[in-house]
Amino acid sequence: MGKAKSLKDKLYGAAVLKMSFRLRGDEESPAFKFVYPGVLRDLELEDDAVERYIVDNREAVERAARGASPAPGPRT
């Protein structure tokens, strides 16, 4: 059996999912309205907690939602 996810890991995953839809302007889409509530239920999270996580960690969440890797080192 796998290791249980921490609350921080759960919040991060839900926040990245939500932000990926938000950045595309798709929060009202049927796909988001179907997937996101199920993720909240499965991870035992509330949307308010996910929103607070987004506010507190916006840069990292947006970067992950865009599929960007961590900031590269100096260019040579």
Image: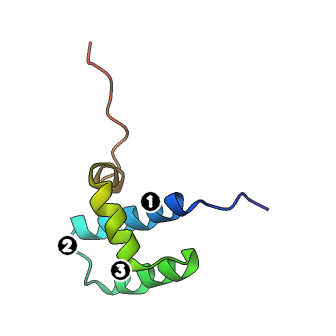
Q: Residue at x 48, y 79 (%)?
A: 40
Position of residue 9 measured from the top left corner of the image (x, y, whole percent): 52, 58
Q: Residue at x 32, y 34 (%)?
A: 71
- For label 3, the residue is 32
- For label 2, the residue is 25
Number of numbered markers: 3
- Amino acid type at image mark 3: Phe
Position of residue 60 measured from the top left corner of the image (x, y, whole percent): 33, 49
Q: From this viewpoint, which residue is outermost toward the top?
A: 76
Q: Is residue 72 above or below residue 7?
A: above
Q: Nearer the viewer, residue 44 or 38?
A: 44
Position of residue 76 measured from the top left corner of the image (x, y, whole percent): 26, 12
Q: Residue at x 26, y 78 (%)?
A: 27
- Amino acid type at image mark 1: Tyr
| Residue 75, numbered label | none
- Amino acid type at image mark 2: Gly
Q: Is residue 8 above or below residue 49?
A: above
Quadrant placement of the N terminus: bottom right
Cα distance between the residues tagged 1 and 3: 17 Å
Q: Is residue 39 above or below residue 69?
A: below
Q: Is residue 52 above or below residue 35?
A: above
- For label 1, the residue is 12
Q: Secondary structure at mark 3?
A: helix
Q: Nearer the viewer, residue 27 or 4?
A: 4
